[in-house]
Image (cartoon, helix red, strand yellow):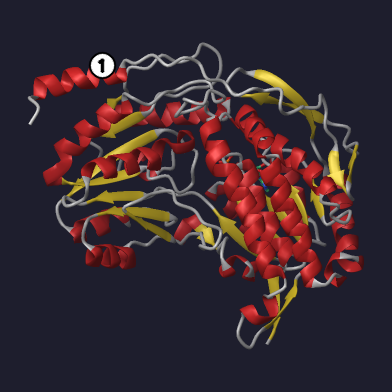
Amino acid sequence: MVPAEKRQRTAAIVSSWDYAPAPEAKDIVKIQDRYGLFIGGKFVEPLSKQHYTTIDPAHEEPLAEVAQAGKADVARAVRAAREAYATRWSKLRPSERAKYLYRIARILQERSREFAVLESRNGGKPIRESRDVDLPLAAAHFFYYAGWADKLEYAFANRKPKPIGVAGQIIPWNFPLLMLAWKIAPALAAGNTVVLKPAETTPLTALLFCDVLRQAELPPGVVNIVTGDGRTGAELVAHSDVNKIAFTGSTEVGKAIQRALAGTGKRLTLELGGKAANVVFDDAPLDQAVEGIVNGIYFNQGHVCCAGSRLFVQESIYDAIISKLKRRMSTLRVGDPLDKNTDVGAINSKMQLDKITSLVQSGIDEGAEIYQPPCKLPERGYWFVPTVFTNVAQSYRIAQEEIFGPVLSVLTFRTPDEAVEKANNTPYGLSAGVWTEKGSRILAMAQKLKAGVVWANTYNRFDPASPFGGYKESGFGREGGLHGLEPYLAFDE
Ligand code: ADP
């Protein structure tokens, strides 16, 4: 056994290593000065005649001018999607549809470095994540749903599926290309056409994706991309010729969309916020659990709807977990998203940084104890030091509200029942984590936790074959797997 003093000396040496810069080259991807809207298979000038600037949040530098689509632009995109649906896409043999999806998947793989660099520049996430997570998963989604396109009639016993028409899809800024893949792949596999609106701060990978569609020779109008802010999204929701809305974003906007659609007969799926519980029992492998905790909350700067933002630790291991966690946090490297050694990148926008800052202040004001490891942040750009709060009461805002940043709130429990009670004490129900050696306990917890996804001895694992979605205020409908096709199909019973 190494004496504690010596262990600490070793720890200090490891965390003080200097890393040479290891930046990924930027010039692999060409960014245009200005983009139009992708409608009917080509880029067109917005009828609104309005553009806005999209930036690189790590440097606060402009990257491109992007169109702000207005009502007439959305109408034009929906017309193109309807025409493509009626004349081409719904008439195509399913096996032919599958070929296009396979092609898109292959091209995404071939151009993955280009997409990863652009994703990190426009969104601020570390290149390690966009390269190793976002891109492979986006391609995998297209591969997976390509496989279903010609098997739909066998997929649902005694039910004959058919497409529903034009899908309006609205996505957030935390996984811009991946969310696009989650939305477009099942919609097309099921035989629908699409009008998709990316988030206002991260439109560039969706616009580069239009070039993939051109390369894949997808028939014009099958996928249309309209950029703009929430007003563009609201126009898409309000358009009478859209048959379905698929939305991923905040609970507040999700509720507004549900209100807008009430009584219209349009189909709706909502994937909204979360405040996931990551529950660590005293028999868990502690070092592995600490890795899972770090991955659960600091992955993608905590801009993750299923982030493990509430950590529940069994009282008997509280001190051990907190000291291991703090030590591990001191090794996290915050900085340039394009550096291959970066663990935590830039906060996506000034607005989000302000929101995180104010919620963290509320935690301090309400009496929680804050810990942030020593950390030198770049001078320009939007940054937030990985943060952990201890001494948190369940009533505090940092234990109740979604922060969507690298901020963890730690609470404790004594018994499994108490853990379940506290973990479920939230309006959300998207995801949860359980750390224990006992298989039976994993099963019992998974049954009792009110969450759409429960990870056991791991966290933030995704697979296109596995359905993802929420309960309660985290929304309804599932994405991924066979379940992810149903919202895009109608059935002749
Ligand atoms: P976030 O917390 O991720 O910023 P939002 O719900 O504000 O969540 O944004 C998610 C997506 O919803 C974005 O593409 C945004 O432009 C869009 N959006 C915002 N307001 C509305 C609205 N009223 N109707 C439709 N879409 C909207």
Q: Secondary structure at mark 1?
A: helix
Q: Would you say 249 lies left or right of 448 here?
A: right
Left or right: 486 in relation to 219 = left
Ligand 1 shows up in the quarter that is top right
What type is the residue that disc 1 sits on?
Ile
Q: Is residue 203 visible?
A: no
Res 442 quadrant in image: bottom left
Looking at the image, residue 478 lies above or below residue 220: below
Q: Nearer the viewer, residue 427 or 12?
A: 12
Q: Position of residue 9 (x, y in %)?
A: 18, 17
Quadrant of the rendering where the N terminus is positioned: top left
Q: Quadrant of residue 364?
A: top left
Q: Which residue in the structure is indicated by mark 1?
A: 13
As rendered, which of 280 and 255 lies closer to the eye? Answer: 280
Residue in the picture at 70% in, 38% down: 205
Residue 437 falls left or right of residue 231 = left
The residue sitting at the top extreme is 379
Residue 346 point in image, percent of width and height: 52, 26
Crowd rating for badge 1 (residues with CA inside 10 Å; few <14, some 14–19, many 20+): few
